[in-house]
């Protein structure tokens, strides 16, 4: 395996193929974005500055391949009785909200395809001028015979073999059956169409990603990701048209996420039935338990989603929260960076450096948790520091777990009970004094409500 070296020292440009926003994103889609989020966080953990770009495909591309079949945006729009942009907007919002529930960081740039039609047209013009694309009766096509090795850059299998068994619509306008559309002339009733030198129409799906990635990251950039279904044709087409246009290497490292399967079955939204994060939450799971489940699988293996797996992830998350909460209470919210790099942190870093091996990284986190469970506050302070440090990559909100723990340490509990006693016996002066003491000494805010006494860890002043 090749070590990762960015083009520019200390900085990484990363492009993630984003969603087609004609429907909800299912947990398979979301899983692929958890994986790239962990990748981004890993690079940042190793002190690299990451510029992350994720597009929003709000132009209808096709269900089967880039130039035959039905327009996805049109399907979604028709179903909802809304315009394509209205549904694109609504589903983009839901997608971003799902991402936030999973602690997926926002990319710095989230370009929409519909805002980049001029860039796509310019790229197509470049390809025509160089003889790599031709104008046909129904649009503009990329001539794959002008790009040696087309379709074999990411996979040794020749595209002819790969698509031999697939259903390919014969299109007489193409010079070669593997040629793919860069621009499609509008058909009557097309909801999304723009002016171009080749008449009104809309761009092919592949050209969107080439145009937007190169606009924000340059003609050669470091990382490009997508699900395994994007290997071919999407990414092979992106490589062909980008490199043909610029004469430069397009992407230095590709990341393809193996699919999430539900009970070992492929889950495709074009098939109809699929699971959303809302379904998972409605079953009573924490969205972060789904994130933890995702972390437990290597991105090259893919994730087998089952209820048993979710149950295990939920219990694991709760156990982590309890352990961290109790340790945090024991240390009174103190954490301490170990002197020199702790062996557990080294193990964690080595796991991430090894092709982002998250299952191994979780094993290191479990060791820190075991340390946090030991009743020795010095060890606990160090364990907490390590866990919060790891959480920069894991993204499980472990600090929140610590602050909202429902556990009080023994001395806190004693003071709390003493105050409860004073309040019940009507000694309000004493009860107020003890309330103040709980806040000042332990950072615990006590509130008397009609349902009884509640407390919250708000932190000590100056701590
Ligand atoms: P789409 O909205 O269909 O373009 O998909 C968005 C992203 O999710 C793409 O990168 C797909 O490759 C990826 N994807 C689709 N289905 C799955 C799945 N079952 N598991 C993981 N990733 C998926
Ligand atoms: Zn793409």
Image: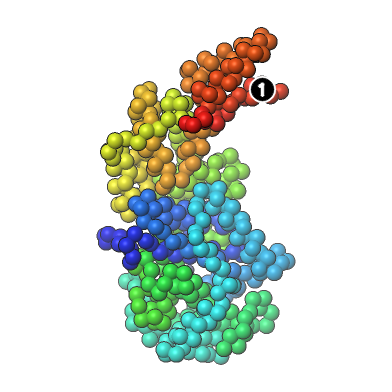
Side of 231 where 456 appears, left or right:
right
Q: Which residue is mark 1?
A: 448
Q: Nearer the viewer, residue 162 or 184?
A: 184
Residue at 60% in and 48% down: 278
Which percent across, then down, holds residue 151?
38, 75
Q: Nearer the viewer, residue 354 or 126?
A: 126
Local secondary structure at mark 1: strand
Please say whether residue 220 is visible from this viewpoint.
Answer: yes
Side of 223 where 399 appears, left or right:
right
Query: Relative to 213, is 365 above or below?
Result: above
Which percent across, then down, holds residue 297?
40, 48
Please say whether residue 405 is visible from this viewpoint.
Answer: no
Q: Quadrant of the N terminus?
A: bottom left
Please name the colour scheme applied to the rendered image: rainbow
Query: Relative to 167, is 355 above or below?
Result: above
Outermost residue, front direction? 462
Q: Residues within 10 Å of mark 1 (few under 14, many from 20)?
A: few
Q: Nearer the viewer, residue 194 or 447?
A: 447
Residue at 67% in and 83% down: 188
Which percent across, then down, holds residue 123?
48, 81
Which percent across, then down, holds residue 424?
66, 12
Assess mark 1: CB under 8 A from ligand 1? no
Residue at 48% in and 64% down: 53
């Amino acid at each position: 395996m090749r070590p990762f070296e960015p083009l520019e020292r200390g900085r990484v440009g990363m492009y993630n193929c984003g969603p087609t926003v004609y429907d909800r994103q299912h947990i398979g889609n979301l899983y692929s974005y958890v994986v790239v989020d962990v990748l981004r966080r890993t690079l940042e953990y190793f002190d690299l500055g990451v510029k992350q770009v994720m597009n929003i495909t709000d132009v209808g591309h096709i269900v089967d391949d880039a130039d035959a079949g039905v327009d996805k945006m049109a399907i979604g729009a028709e179903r909802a009785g809304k315009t394509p942009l209205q549904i694109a907007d609504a589903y983009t919002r839901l997608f971003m909200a799902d991402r936030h529930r999973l602690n997926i960081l926002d990319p710095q740039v989230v370009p929409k395809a519909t805002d980049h039609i001029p860039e796509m047209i310019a790229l197509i013009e470049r390809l025509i001028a160089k003889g790599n694309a031709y104008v046909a009766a129904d649009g503009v096509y990329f001539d794959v015979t002008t790009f040696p090795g087309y379709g074999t850059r990411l996979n040794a299998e020749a595209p002819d073999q790969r698509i031999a068994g697939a259903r390919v619509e014969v299109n007489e306008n193409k010079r070669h059956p593997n040629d793919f559309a860069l621009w499609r002339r509008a058909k009557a009733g097309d909801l999304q169409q723009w002016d171009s030198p080749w008449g009104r129409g809309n761009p092919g799906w592949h050209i969107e990603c080439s145009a937007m990635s190169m606009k924000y990251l340059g003609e050669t950039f470091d990382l490009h990701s997508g699900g395994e279904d994007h290997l071919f044709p999407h990414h092979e087409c992106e490589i062909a048209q980008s490199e043909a246009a610029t004469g430069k290497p397009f992407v230095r490292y590709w990341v393809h996420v193996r699919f999430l399967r539900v009970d070992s079955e492929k889950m495709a939204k074009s098939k109809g039935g699929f699971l959303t994060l809302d379904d998972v939450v409605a079953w009573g799971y924490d969205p972060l338990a789904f994130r933890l489940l995702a972390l437990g699988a290597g991105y090259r293996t893919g994730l087998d989603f089952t209820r048993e797996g979710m149950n295990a992830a939920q219990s694991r998350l709760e156990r982590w929260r309890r352990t961290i909460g109790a340790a945090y209470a024991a240390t009174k919210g103190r954490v301490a960076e170990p002197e020199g790099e702790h062996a557990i942190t080294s193990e964690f870093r080595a796991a991430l450096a090894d092709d982002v091996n998250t299952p191994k990284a979780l094993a290191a986190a479990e060791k820190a948790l075991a340390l946090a469970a030991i009743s020795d506050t010095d060890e606990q302070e160090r364990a907490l520091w390590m866990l919060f440090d790891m959480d920069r990559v894991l993204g499980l909100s472990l600090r929140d777990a610590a602050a909202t723990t429902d556990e009080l340490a023994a001395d806190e509990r004693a003071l709390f009970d003493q105050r409860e006693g004073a309040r019940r016996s009507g000694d309000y002066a004493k009860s107020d004094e003890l309330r103040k003491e709980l806040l000042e000494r332990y950072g615990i805010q006590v509130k008397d409500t009609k349902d009884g006494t509640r407390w919250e860890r708000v932190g000590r002043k100056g701590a």
